[in-house]
Amino acid sequence: MLLKNIISKDMIANAIDIIDNNIDKAFSIGPVKDGQITNDDTISFTNMLPDIHEYIKPKLENHFKVKLKKTNDFGRIYTQGAALRNHKDSWHCQYSATINLLNVPSNGRWLFLTSIDNKNWTEYEMSPGDCVVYEGLKLNHKRNALEYEECYQWFFHYIEENGQYDNQHYYGSRYENKNI
């Protein structure tokens, strides 16, 4: 489902400043590549926007009708030609939101696509501040090749509080079971 203007223009500007001021922390620059993306120029970040992650949580709880627990946030600066490969997410992305932060040029619009059966796709055209919410374990999702220069896109992931994955904990790029 598309939620229009889930965050304010001020929040968007602050997020872009954080991202742009931390380009050196992107983990896809150089020989490390992001396997979900089809080009080498797209860069990725993790756990850089905790304020937005917390801010949207009640809105997502209202939408999904469950109490949520944050796992991680993950973002990319997609470059022209980049496509997001069709996939479903792992357990730490049980409930997800993707927010468009910036399109260069500003009139660029990139579609986010979801499908329950991998045949019939729902398309969401996103502008800065818009959010698509989805269940990452249930829905296939992808993006076709970016036709314009750049797109800043961020993903915010959650699990159900006290749900089947609540005994797990996400540590950056590792998963651990707290009960072991």
Image (cartoon, rainbow, N blue to C red):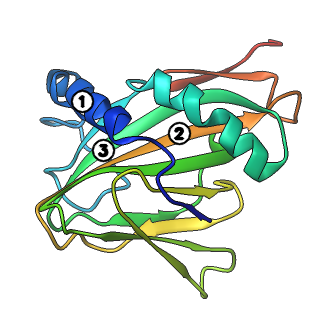
Examine the rendered structure and indicate whether residue 30 appears above or below residue 82. Answer: above
Question: Could you give the CA–CA distance between mark 2 and mark 1, rounded to whole angstroms?
Answer: 15 Å
Question: Could you give the CA–CA distance between mark 1 and mark 3, rounded to whole angstroms?
Answer: 9 Å
Q: Quadrant of residue 105?
A: bottom left
Q: Earlier in the sequence, mark 1 or mark 3?
A: 1
In front of the other: 177 or 44 = 44
Q: Which residue carries the number 3 mark? A: 76
Q: Position of residue 21 (x, y in %)?
A: 16, 22
Q: Give the SS element for disc 1.
A: helix
Q: Which residue carries the number 1 mark? A: 19
**Amino acid type at image mark 2:** Phe
The residue carrying pointer 1 sits among few (fewer than 14), some (14 to 19) or many (20 or more) residues within 10 Å by Cα, namely many
**Which is in the foreground here, disc 1 or disc 3?**
1
Q: Which residue carries the number 2 mark? A: 156
Residue at 83% x, 13% y: name it. 179
| Disc 2 to disc 1: CB gap under 8 Å | no
Q: Which of marks 2 and 3 is nearer the N terminus?
A: 3
Q: In which quarter of the image is the C terminus?
A: top right
Examine the rendered structure and indicate whether residue 86 appears above or below residue 163. Answer: below
